[in-house]
Image (cartoon, rainbow, N blue to C red):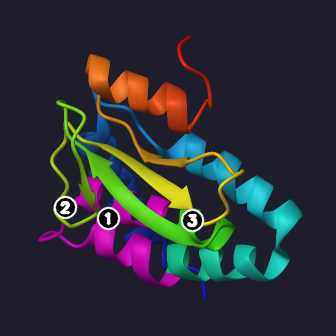
Amino acid sequence: MPAPADVRARADARSDSVLKGSRDPRDYYRERLRALKAENPDAFRRALAYYEDRLIPAVAAEDSDPRAEWLEYGRVLATLFAAGRTVQIDPTGRASEYARPVPADHLVLHLPDAPARPALIVGIPPRLSPAQKATHDLLVKQSLGS
């Protein structure tokens, strides 16, 4: 069931405020949803249910962190695409398991279990450090440089 209009409006306003000046993931997540719809309709329905039932109410809540909620939604989308694990990479290039809250300067990637599949972006900091860019190029672009 879709979130009520006032809850959706509050979630949109809080998202706009918090994500302003950073990399807003919403357009990227919409693209991922379209791809998920084409690849796996059941997973697409689960992603929409999470969006309506959990994400929008959580982002609308005054005591929530909208950035963290959107990042978690990105992780949910990635896990619906491919089984695997989600990691966060700090500016020095050190990887650790995804754990909330994720610092704003961490790159977050989902690493599919299937070795031939590229890593999926979950969250990108406003600026990638050289180590994060190298990790991104290798695991997401599957190249050794851009």
Give the residue at x 26% y 21%: 129
Q: Horizontal and vertical percent for residue 79?
A: 56, 70
Give the residue at x 57% y 51%: 29
Q: Earlier in the sequence, mark 3 or mark 1?
A: 1
Identify the residue position indicated by label 2 in the image.
65
Q: Is 64 within the magenta?
A: yes
Which region is colored magenta? 53-75
Left or right, 131 with reference to 6: left
Calculate the distance from the C-alpha at mark 3 to the C-alpha at mark 1.
12 Å
Q: Is residue 128 visible?
A: no
Disc 2 + disc 1, Cβ < 8 Å: yes
Q: Earlier in the sequence, mark 3 or mark 2?
A: 2
Whether 59 is drawn above or below 46: the answer is: above
- Res. 69 mark: 1
Number of the front mark, 3 or 1: 3
- Residue type (three-letter) at the residue carrying disc 3: Leu
Q: Horizontal and vertical percent for residue 25?
A: 46, 43
Quadrant of the image containing the N terminus: bottom right
Q: Secondary structure at mark 2?
A: loop
- Residue type (three-letter) at the residue carrying disc 1: Glu
- Res. 77 mark: 3
Crowd rating for badge 3 (residues with CA inside 10 Å; few <14, some 14–19, many 20+): many
Q: Is residue 52 visible?
A: yes
Q: Is 52 within the magenta?
A: no
**Front-most of 89 and 106?**
89
Number of the front mark, 3 or 2: 3
Calculate the distance from the C-alpha at mark 2 to the C-alpha at mark 1.
6 Å
